[in-house]
Amino acid sequence: MYRFLVLVLVLAACGSSETDLETSFCDILASGPFDDLVATSTTADAPTSTLDDRAADVDLTSGTFIAFTPDEAGSYVFGLSDDVDFVVVDEAGEPLVRADEVLGADCDTLAVRSTWNLTAATYYLSFDTTAASVLVTAEESDDDL
């Protein structure tokens, strides 16, 4: 009986953070709150969103860049409404290496979860897509997608 209880607790602990993050992203992408942003063609005047418990509705018709500044160093997971290519670049314009990516979710509003290791600095999300817009949110993570 003791082993069964331990197994149940371990399985619950392992599954809860992914489900919580996925559920949070699904809820935010479905109902907001939203920041309406128009992406720019350069990083110099890219609009900023905290993406903290909110999503950005990014209009991509004028450019591909939005800015994001994390509160502290860590792994950040970005959730996107559509499977569009994007890269995170630093202030010098250098692309970072994506730590992990998961396609799909248990809801229709979340298509991609992508993890990036960031420090407390300004970064730019650069979208490479022909889509007119995309919804994006982010959350600091403990390496769980």
Image: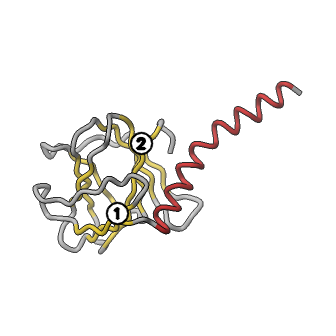
Mark 1 highlights which residue? 56
Along the horizontal axis of the image, is 9 left or right of 144? right
Marks 1 and 2 sit apart, C-alpha to C-alpha, by 16 Å
Q: Secondary structure at mark 2?
A: strand
- Amino acid type of the residue tagged 1 in the rendering: Ala
Q: Name which residue lies at 36% across and 35% down.
A: 74
The spot of residue 83 in percent (x, y) is 41, 62
Q: Position of residue 62 (x, y in %)?
A: 18, 72
Identify residue type, mark 2: Glu
Q: In the depicted view, which residue is nearer to us: 73 or 102?
A: 73
Query: In terms of secondary structure, where does tag 1 sit?
Result: strand
Query: Do residues under tags 1 and 2 come within 8 Å of each other at their CB atoms?
Result: no
**Placement of the N terminus among the 4 image quadrants:** top right
The residue identified by callout 2 is: 140
User: Residue at point 76% right, 31% down?
Assistant: 7
- Where residue 10 sits, quadrant-wise, is top right
Q: Residues within 10 Å of mark 2 (few under 14, many from 20)?
A: many
Residue 94's place in the image compared with 52, above or below, is above
Residue at position x 57%, y 64% in the image:
107
**Residue 9 numbered mark, or none:** none
